[in-house]
Amino acid sequence: MNNLDAILLIVIVSLVTILLRFLPFIIFNGKKETPKIITYLGNVLPFSVMAMLVVYCFKDVTFNNFPYGLPELIAGGSVFILHILKKNTLLSIIGGTAIYMILIQFIFI
Amino acid sequence: MRQIIKHSFIKSLPVMAGYLVLGFGFGIISEKSGYGFIWVLAMSTFIYAGSMQYVTISLLTGGATLISAALTTLMVNARHLFYGITMIEPYKKTGLFKPYLIFGLTDETYSLVCNGETPDNVDFTKYAFFVSLFNQIYWIVGSILGAIIGNLIKINFMGIEFAMTALFITVLVDQWRKTKNHFPSIIGLVTSIICLIIFGKENFLIPSMLIISLVLWLTSELNKKKEVKNNE
């Protein structure tokens, strides 16, 4: 691909990404009252979206052959338990990430 | 102001860990594919969407057409529509900051602002601005470092990108604690797992979002009817 084509491609990817981010704000621009259903979804969706994002993070994990998703499940479980017990975001993240790195670099290799 | 900057910085630390590393990885791959420093800087500044930038590299090296690039971006980034819908109210009164706040609404930034609240002494608009700005700086710095010195670093960082997953799990737990109505979290979890199994990892986000919205809308309608009945 020559440079001009590459630049055009990057511009397209950038514009579509920007469009997707701005679209809801353009449609419901606050001049008219936002429909009740959108306000309602706006209130409840953050909970569903975070759950969906967690699943999204696990999408590349293979459960049917070695290491059967064990590093991700153990590390993810550790974050979960740490956070319930200690309620300290940084601690949960650093702890879970360290466990994950040890698991994939030294144990499940 | 210093307090706001400090608060935003501390909140953004987990993203710093994740973005420096994921950005670094992106920089290395991009450089190896023939798209060095300037390209990396341009992509991280103007596209600024983590997983999409990785995909962009394969679009570039695979010689994708502009139409297929646009469609791929639509598929990969459709979840941003969702973020927008939930941020319409919190971002309503953010004035001049609004365009940048919307532009910078990545998964990770979203996870830090989606509750629309900050401690009493911290202004939400400024908090959201600094978090968005810091996060993009981490991403740009990480990716540029990857492009420039990626080949020199021998430390094994493999797996540090798990910091992002960990961040999302902690937000999920915090949200669970803050509310009594766990239905939206559970619906989100169950629907996306089922859709992942049925539609596969490339295509599951859009059906998940549609079904989640539909179920949440239907249950709110049902609840309304119940309330009407109870009041009669």
Image: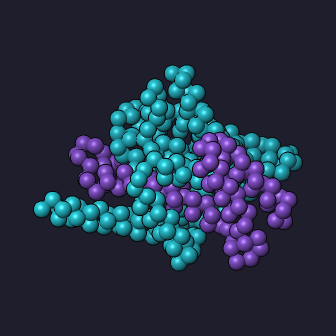
- In the rendered image, residue B43, in percent from the top left (x then y), is placed at 61, 48
- In the rendered image, residue A91, in percent from the top left (x then y), is placed at 67, 43
Give me the residue at 41% from left, 65% from top: B212
Left or right, B14 with respect to A8, comes to right
Q: Nearer the viewer, residue A58 or B57?
A: A58
Give me the residue at 84% from left, 62% from top: A107
Count of marks, rendered view? 0
Q: Nearer the viewer, residue B188 or B44?
A: B188
Q: How is the image coloured?
A: by chain
Can see residue B74?
Answer: no
Left or right, A4 with respect to B176, comes to right
Q: Which chain is purple?
A: A
Relative vertical location of residue B49 with respect to residue A65 in this rendering, above or below: above
Q: Nearer the viewer, residue A4 or B33?
A: B33
Relative vertical location of residue A65 with respect to residue B116 in this rendering, above or below: below
Q: Nearer the viewer, residue A27 or A86?
A: A86
Can see residue B152?
Answer: yes
- In the rendered image, residue B48, in percent from the top left (x then y), is placed at 57, 47
Left or right, B13 with respect to B193, comes to right
Give me the residue at 62% from left, 54% from top: A80
Left or right, B83 with respect to B44, comes to left
Q: Which chain is cyan?
A: B
- Which picture quadrant has residue B90? top left
Give me the residue at 12% from left, 62% from top: B232
- In the rendered image, residue B213, in percent from the top left (x then y), is placed at 38, 63
Query: Residue lying furthest top in this view?
Result: B2
- Which picture quadrant has residue B133? top right
